[in-house]
Amino acid sequence: MTPTTMRPGPIGAQRTSETVPRSAMEPIFTELARRWEQAGRTVPGRHDPEWARLARRSPWPPR
C-alpha cells in the first residue's frame, strides 16, 4: 500500500481525489468484508445496530 498525504486546498474548494488511493488489493478486502457480514460480524463502513443503540444512550446515569 502506498501512503499518501492529503494537502489542504483553498477553503470551499471541491476535492477531486480520494484521501487514500484505491489499492489493487481491494478485491481481497471486499471478499473479507463479505465473509465477515455473512458471519454476522461488524463490517467497517456498514450500519452497526449495536453501536447505534449504544451511541444513542446518555453517558450520564439518570437522576
Image: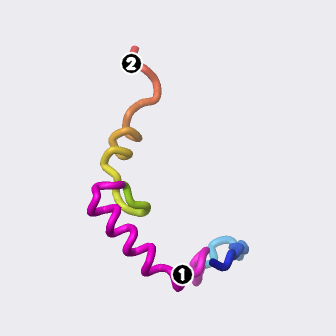
62 relative to 7 in the view: left or right: left
Q: Is residue 54 magenta?
A: no
Which quadrant holds the C terminus? top left
In the image, is residue 34 above or below residue 42?
below
Q: Give percent across and percent down for residue 12.
A: 63, 73
Residue that numbered label 1 is attached to: 22
In the image, is residue 50 above or below residue 14?
above
The one nearer the camera, 46 or 61, is 46
Residue 1: quadrant of the picture: bottom right
- On residue 62, which mark appears? 2
3 relative to 57 in the view: left or right: right
Q: Give percent across and percent down for residue 2.
A: 66, 79
The one nearer the camera, 41 or 8, is 41
In the image, is residue 45 above or below residue 16?
above
Residue lying at 39% horizontally and 18% vertically, measured from the top left: 62
What is the CA distance from the residue labelled 1 to the residue labelled 2?
46 Å
In the image, what residue type sits under mark 1? Arg
59 relative to 33 in the view: left or right: right
Specify the segment rendered in magenta.
15-41
The one nearer the camera, 25 or 17, is 25
Label 1, secondary structure: give it.
loop
In the image, what residue type sits under mark 2? Pro
In the image, is residue 21 above or below residue 47?
below
Residue lying at 28% horizontally and 58% vertically, measured from the top left: 39
Q: Give percent across and percent down for residue 56.
A: 37, 39
Marks 2 and 1: in contact by CB < 8 Å?
Answer: no
Residue 41: quadrant of the picture: bottom left
The single residue placed furthest to the top in the displayed view is 63
